[in-house]
Image: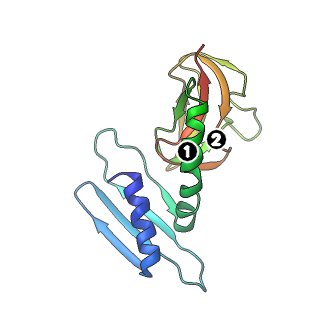
Amino acid sequence: MDIKEIQSLIKFVAKSGASEVKLETDDIKITIRTGTLSSGSEPTYVQQIPMGAAPAVGAVPAAASQAPAQPVEPAADTKAEDDSKYITIKSPIIGTFYRKPSPDKGPFVEVGDNISKGDVLCVIEAMKLFNDIESEVTGKIVKVLAEDSSPVEFDQPLFLIDPS
């Protein structure tokens, strides 16, 4: 089950009015809880059973997973044509994106910085573990596509790199 199918399931449950739905297969276990009007929205938990190099998963608020998913996808499609000459660095895991190694230090990279293969671009926190995200290419940072301290999804674009 991929992230798009999970998002579709969350939307379906929200529209159906059910307060809780549990789905369990051989490789994934999902519990979706929706809140009532008086208590606000409750978190949606997705737990994946470890299988080889499967990406880490975490808690995703139900309301947050529905609203941003729709505007982000069309914007990415329209910009893909303009940015076709650039390499996109994508998130290998679900977690929280950090541009700095700590709050009192500067960002790992800025727009316009030249980077080499293996340079640390950012950190993604997943389940209390901080994972360094290293560049797989040499080039120049053209654009930072994610906000500092914001949640990111698997395969979400983080940086645009000009390899020339």
Quadrant for the C terminus, please.
top right
Q: Secondary structure at mark 1?
A: strand
- Determine the image quadrant of residue 26: bottom left
78 left or right of 106 in image? left
The furthest residue to the bottom: 38
Asked if the residues shown at circle 2 and circle 1 are in contact, with their CB atoms under 8 angstroms apart, the answer is yes
List x then y, in percent, for residue 20.
40, 77
Question: In whole angstroms, how far apart are the C-alphas of marks 2 and 1?
Answer: 8 Å
Residue located beneath label 2 in the image: 98
Q: Does 73 sit above or below residue 79? A: below
The total number of labels drawn is: 2
Q: Which residue is mark 1?
A: 125
- In the image, taking residue 76 as reference, residue 92 lies left or right, namely left
Element marked by disc 2? strand
**Residue 138 falls in which quadrant of the image?**
top right
Residue 49 point in image, percent of width and height: 31, 53
Report the amino acid beneath label 2: Tyr
Seen at 38% across and 68% down, the residue is 31
Position of 123 relative to 23 (above/below): above
Residue at the spot 63% in from the left edge and 42% down from the top edge: 146
Q: Counting other residues with Cα less than 10 Å from the Cα at mark 1, is it few (<14), some (14-19), or many (20 or more)? A: some
